[in-house]
Amino acid sequence: MKDVYVYLSGLPEDKKRLFVPIFGSVDRFYTVVYLIARNGHATEQDKPHLWEERLRVIRQVEKKVEKLLNSFHLNGQEIVADIAGDYFNDFVKYKELEPDLSNDEFISIIQRISLFA
């Protein structure tokens, strides 16, 4: 298991409950941040139409997640960076997390992040 995932899984229950209104669970939080990192990387690589604007929005969402975690008295920058590191480690091994949420669920969570952060 990955260190940051073990850390998040081991948080006290009162801290884990903070993730529920926005993400549903700590597991879902990990998946969402992993997907944010994957989308940022894919955007940088593929450079789709208006890719710079898309990348700017992805970076804003990352910053909002960091800010939200900081409000939970957790190190947001470190946690987001560690999860992104997990994504990149998987990427170079040609192995990626298979998300257990739909695109609509992902978008809904991103919208909630923007409301709370």
Image: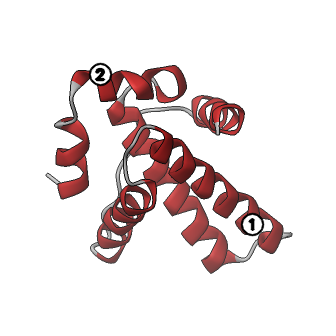
Examine the image and state in which quarter residue 86 appears.
bottom left
| Horizontal arrangement in the rendering, residue 97 relative to residue 44 (left or right) | left
- Please, is residue 97 above or below residue 48 in the view? above
Q: Which of these two is toward me, 106 or 57?
A: 57
Across and down, in percent, residue 92 comes to 33, 77
User: Which is in the foreground here, disc 1 or disc 2?
Assistant: 2
Amino acid marked by disc 2: Asp
User: In the image, which disc is placed on residue 56?
Assistant: 1
Residue beneath disc 2? 14
- Please, is residue 73 above or below residue 104 in the view? below
Q: Residues within 10 Å of mark 2 (few under 14, many from 20)?
A: few
Across and down, in percent, residue 53 comes to 82, 67
Q: Residue at x 25, y 54 (%)?
A: 4
| Horizontal arrangement in the rendering, residue 96 relative to residue 47 (left or right) | left
Examine the image and state in which quarter residue 106 appears.
top right
Q: Which of these two is toward me, 64 or 106?
A: 64
Which residue is outermost to the right?
A: 50
Q: Which of these two is toward me, 50 or 26?
A: 26
